Image (tube, coloured by chain):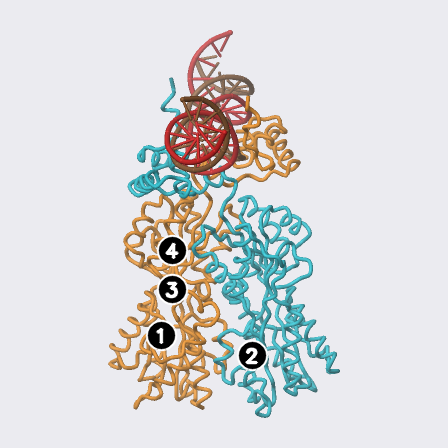
Chain colours: A cyan, B orange, C brown, D red
Amino acid sequence: MSGNSRKRRGDGRPTIAQVAALAGVGTMTASRALRTPHLVSDALRASVERAVEELNYVPNLSARALASKSSDVVVVLVPTLTQHIFSEVVKGIYDGLEGTPLQVQIGNTRYDAEEEERLLRVFLRQRPSAVIVSGTHQSKASRQLLERAGCPVVQIMDVSDDPIDRIVGYSHVDAGYAATRHLIEKGYERLAFFTGWMHQRAEGRLRGFEQATREAGIYRPDLIFRVEDRVSFDLGSTMAGPNRRFGSHPFSSPGLGRAMLSDALDLPRPPDAVFCNNDILAIGVLFEAHSRGIAVPDQLGICGFNDLDLMAAAHPSLSSLRTLRYEIGFESVQVIRRALDGRPDDQKIRNMGFEVMARQSTNRNGG
Amino acid sequence: MSGNSRKRRGDGRPTIAQVAALAGVGTMTASRALRTPHLVSDALRASVERAVEELNYVPNLSARALASKSSDVVVVLVPTLTQHIFSEVVKGIYDGLEGTPLQVQIGNTRYDAEEEERLLRVFLRQRPSAVIVSGTHQSKASRQLLERAGCPVVQIMDVSDDPIDRIVGYSHVDAGYAATRHLIEKGYERLAFFTGWMHQRAEGRLRGFEQATREAGIYRPDLIFRVEDRVSFDLGSTMAGPNRRFGSHPFSSPGLGRAMLSDALDLPRPPDAVFCNNDILAIGVLFEAHSRGIAVPDQLGICGFNDLDLMAAAHPSLSSLRTLRYEIGFESVQVIRRALDGRPDDQKIRNMGFEVMARQSTNRNGG
DNA sequence: TCCTCCTAAGGTACCGCTACCAAATGCAGC
DNA sequence: GCTGCATTTGGTAGCGGTACCTTAGGAGGA
């Protein structure tokens, strides 16, 4: 008989069968003692726990996932890992999952819908317990994949009337509008809009900006600056480090903010205020203003977006629109946990809002 | 007979057996056609591929991991997700794994050795293909777990004579020394050291600072400022957002940099240069100097650490010590890939070095 | 006392894939 | 024609759990 020599050897780690044998119980009882202890008598549970301790048993997750068809994995797709915004969201997600058996699996879509689709296909193989995706602009195929994923799906960082399943975020149009209104109310009249790479949500903020300036009768399309227009800009700094490889998009950088302000000031009638689509641009704008001796806020108002720590600490302190990145991440997993616990929320849309942080950089004439 | 009704139903997705049946081959041939195509004849491989296409087959990763005892997961433990430094490392890791079947699993240790140990125990259940951990100060138990992990292990962001397996990073003592030497060579004489939370690597930089100042005979322990000393500092800003919950450590913030400079300037004999343990502190120091009308670099030299984009774009531009975060992440997975491919590197230690970026903020008297 | 109902415990057949072995095939050398 | 070796292909027994079903035993009611 080839019998025994034929056997595939395990990797030496104890299995639940060994635990059960040591505890003098059946394997099912051992399994139950670990997963649903209330269904097992105190005496047996104790002896199983003792056996686990003694053998230093750790369950094999693959076997569990295979047998139970559920993997305890939460798939999270974000467009970038290197922007502070998303790393804070991710931290909120991790913190929100603290104390649950759920594991996070992060995918980086690089702001690319095709890549998102590819990652979804790969990750859904694991039969995740839930999926979190960024924004609402999934491809048709991605949307279909998510609708059929058979698990809670949360879109984050935006709101929409037509979510795939749940959505947690805020309105970028409203946010852009509110920031622009703030500048207008402070008395600025020639408002510029600076933006790096125009992803979907950045577009929303621009729409809000356009709406507010149009309403006020001060809309000036020539004062809208996008990185795409500025082919002459040396992307050296933007493309350094993490962006160097694989042609990442030049989203923004402080250097870009400086260059854009430089361009804007060359116009015959330069802007008297700038709404920057993110705080990093705003910091660059501030430094360029410094270097040219332009007074902020009197000659130039500056408002950023997101309200990083940096904004309050700058000199002059920079106004910005505070978004709740961490909270969005945290809340999105609460939504998931409630759904997995069988008590899903009534409302599918969770608008987390935002706040205009008015600081010195827009406080013209001492306010 | 209960027979058929007893059967556990699958979840409807096609299995490799169905693929094989449709292709008219054995399951093993189908499996081989997908994983080791060169071992299968062209004809059969083609028909398996056709069947995969037709059924829209996706392999079940849990089953594969269970049968093959290898999960294609690379476990990555980092101390924080919200610092730019580590998100760039992580991006390098993702980019380096592009095109491989390997998946990343990130764990956040929060700079806590016990948490690291706990995460290791959890993650090692998955029998990962490789593990990446940050730094060299693992607990004894963690080290033992890693030594017995049975897969390549790479420590990153530091170097050490005694790595667990491989190590990719740079010497923080050398880096701190080099930055300090730069300040000394520029003619500064009363050097201060500002630091947020003192993790292991920050300690190394401080040792380099102390060594350089001692050698130059200008060591002044009273000019070393740590966040721990500064209980009076309002952590409001530092603890906002992601740090608000779960008592994260107040690593650093621009506000802390401002406060520290403020303290330092209150001394009877204030420093004439500051080496900041990270760039965020340095930016805060610059803003505080601005607000007080202190001339940088003539009255005060500033040098940061890591060389974020921000440093080159500041006004005046800020000197910093450039570290290769992205490259360390990228290289660490190359080390892993070579090891998994059976052609491991000869050298266990990979020192990626660093570079002093001399800019205006340390260019006293016009250089 | 007997029977039903409920709970705790256990037996066993899978989950879907791959390692291991065996068999079939093709071809060169004697 | 037969043997020996390399290359392809296939059968089958797991991998380590859990779902499903059965059984044992005690409580409660007629």
At label 2, the amino acid type is Met
B225, B314: nearer the viewer: B225
| Residue hosting label 1 | B195
Q: Residue A338 carries which label?
A: none
First of labels 4, 3 by sequence position: 4
Q: Which percent across, then down, holds residue A216? A: 73, 82
Q: Are marks 2 and 4 in contact (CB under 8 Å)?
A: no
Q: Which percent across, then down, holds residue B80? A: 42, 63
Q: In which quarter of the image is residue A263?
A: bottom right
Residue found at the very far bottom of the displayed protein = A365
Give the CA separation, mark 3 to mark 2: 41 Å
Q: In which quarter of the image is residue B209?
A: bottom left
Chain to which the residue tagged by mark 2 belongs: A
Left-right relation of A241 to B22: left
Mark 3: few, some, or many residues within 10 Å (few <14, many ≥20)? some
Q: Which percent across, then down, holds residue B62? A: 49, 40
* Dot 3 and dot 1 within a common chain: yes
| Residue hosting label 4 | B133
Secondary structure beneath disc 3? loop
